[in-house]
Image (cartoon, rainbow, N blue to C red):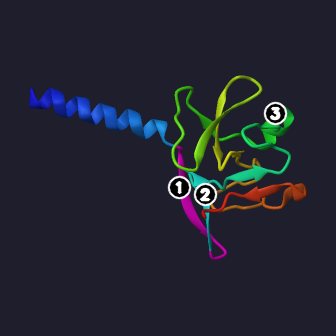
Amino acid sequence: MRTVIGLAALLWCATAAFAAPPVRTADHAGEQIFTDVKGMTLYTFDKDKPGKSNCNSECAANWPPLMAAADAKPEGNWTVVTREDGKKMWAHDGRPVYRFSGDKKPGDTKGNGFGGAWHLVKVH
């Protein structure tokens, strides 16, 4: 019986881990920023509205959204936004979050300031 309870607890914890936003923090020029679990920098887009992504189609090809599972739940400052195509993505402080296709390796921040509209997601 203990084995079954232990296994159930382990499975519940594993499931809960997948529901959490898949992010980490990293140091960038003395500030803490968010990255995805692979260390790729995360960004926000000035043309988005709180809770709404305006980066679709070609934009999303260059700025891939940080996708969320269909059953993902908000956690702290992280919320879930439904995209134009009905898929879910993560948002920080209500602002949808993306990676940049021009960032080739963990720690790259080439998207910061791009077009005057893309910014690092900072830890506050």
- The quadrant in which residue 122 appears is bottom right
> Which numbered marker is on residue 56?
3
Check disc 2 and report the residue beneath it: 34
Within 10 Å of disc 3 (Cα), the crowding (few <14, some 14-19, many 20+) is: some
Q: Earlier in the sequence, mark 1 or mark 2?
A: 1
Q: Does any portion of residue 51 appear in the rendered image?
A: yes
Check disc 1 and report the residue beneath it: 24
Q: Position of residue 34 (x, y in %)?
A: 61, 57
Q: Hey, what amino acid is under mark 1?
A: Arg
Q: Position of residue 104 (x, y in %)?
A: 70, 54
**Disc 3 secondary structure class:** loop
Give the residue displayed 82% in from the left and 37% down from the top.
54
Separation of residues labelled 3 and 1 (CA atoms): 25 Å
Q: Hey, what amino acid is under mark 3?
A: Asn
Going by the image, does 74 lie left or right of 118?
Answer: left
Q: Earlier in the sequence, mark 3 or mark 1?
A: 1
Residue 29 included in the magenta stretch of the image: yes
Report the label total: 3
Taking the view exactly as shown, the residue that stands out farthest to the left is 1
Q: Could you say which is closer to the camera, residue 78 or residue 29?
A: 78
- The quadrant in which residue 58 appears is top right
Q: Earlier in the sequence, mark 2 or mark 3?
A: 2
- Image quadrant containing the C terminus: bottom right
Q: Could you say which is closer to the camera, residue 121 or residue 110?
A: 121
Within 10 Å of disc 2 (Cα), the crowding (few <14, some 14-19, many 20+) is: many
Q: Position of residue 48 (x, y in %)?
A: 81, 43
Magenta stretch?
21-30
Residue 122 included in the magenta stretch of the image: no
Q: Could you say which is closer to the camera, residue 22 or residue 122?
A: 122
Q: Hey, what amino acid is under mark 2?
A: Phe
Going by the image, does 17 lie left or right of 42?
Answer: left
Separation of residues labelled 2 and 3 (CA atoms): 22 Å
